[in-house]
Amino acid sequence: MDVSGPKPRIHVFGFMDETGLLHSAKTDRIFGLGLLVSQNTRELHRAIINLKNRRGYHREFKFSDITDQNLAVYKELIDVFFGCTNNRFHCLVVDKETYQITKNEKSHTAYNKLAAALIAGSIDYKRSRASEYITVLADDVSTSKDDKFEKIIREAIKKKQRRNALFGIARLESHAVSEIQMTDVLLGLVAYSFKIRLGAAKGSGAKLRLLKHLQRKLGTLELSHQQSIKLARGEVFQVIENNKK
C-alpha cells in the first residue's frame, strides 16, 4: 500500500496567556507562558459557557480571583478541561533567578522567542498521521511600537516546522475569550506550584485546594517540575522548564 504523499491536515486553535513579568526580577520570581490547544473549540467553548450559565457566574475566570467562595466553580472549570476530548495544555515556566535577558536584548524580543518555542513545540505533539495547523489567540499585552510579535513567531515556527504551520495569530482581550481565561487558571496553578517549591509562596487556602484538585485529575503529586501527562480521553498536560539562556 502506497502511503506516500502529504499528510492530512488538522486545524486547531491555541489560546495563550502569561503570568508574571519577564523583564523584572524584583517582582514574581516565576514567569510562565501557557497554551491551551483544542481540536474541538466549539465543544470546549459551549462547556465553559454552560458552566457560567448554570452557576450564574458571569465574571472573568482568573487565577488571582480564586477564593473560598468561588472555589467550587473553579473546580468545575478544571473538570471542563478534562470533560471535553482532545484538549492539550502546554506551558513554559521560567525561573527568573537563572534565566537572564542579555544586555542588548529587549524584553519583548525574549518574550517572542519563548512564545514561538512554546507554540512550535505544541504543534503535532506526538502525532504522526496528520499535520497540524494552528491559529493562536493570545491575551493582549502592552508592548512597544517596534514589537514584531506576529512576524517573529510566524517565522520561528516556519523554521522549526519547515512549513507554515501557524495559520494566524492575534491578540485579544481575555475577558472576551473564555478559553484564554481557562489558560490563565491552568497556568496560574502550575506557576503557583513552582512558587511553593521555591519558597516564594506559602501554599494555603483556596488556591492550594484547587491545585490539589488539578493534581488529582492528572494523577500526579506535584506540577512543579518538567513533565508530560497523557490521559485516556486524549488530554495532554505538559510542563516545560526553561531556566537557562
Image: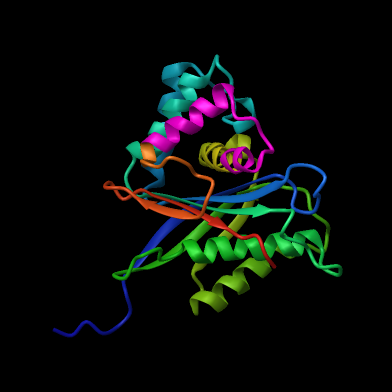
Across and down, in percent, residue 119 comes to 54, 61
Question: Is 70 located above or below residue 207 in the figure?
Answer: above
Tell me which secondary structure the magenta stretch mostly adopts: helix
Report the quarter where the N terminus lies.
Answer: bottom left
Instruction: Give the residues drawn in magenta, as a range.
Output: 192-216
Identified at 44% across, 35% down, the residue is 214
Give above or below for 181 relative to 25: above
Q: Can residue 100 be seen in this view?
A: yes
Q: Residue at x 61, y 60 (%)?
A: 242
Q: Does the magenta stretch include residue 208?
A: yes
> Where residue 175 sits: x, y (%)?
62, 34
Can the viewer see residue 163? Answer: no
| Quadrant hosting residue 23 | bottom right
What is the x, y in percent for residue 46? 40, 34
Residue 57 higher or lower than 98, as above or below:
above
Which of the pair 123/187 is nearer the observer? 187
Looking at this view, name the residue that lies furthest to the top: 69
Q: In which quarter of the image is the C terminus?
A: bottom right
In the image: residue 84, left or right of residue 135:
left
Q: Specify the farthest residue to the right.
A: 103
Q: Does the magenta-highlighted stretch encompass residue 78?
A: no
What percent of the width, then of the height, locates residue 89? 46, 49
Q: Which residue is drawn at 40% across and 26% down?
A: 50
Residue drawn 33% across and 79% down? 6
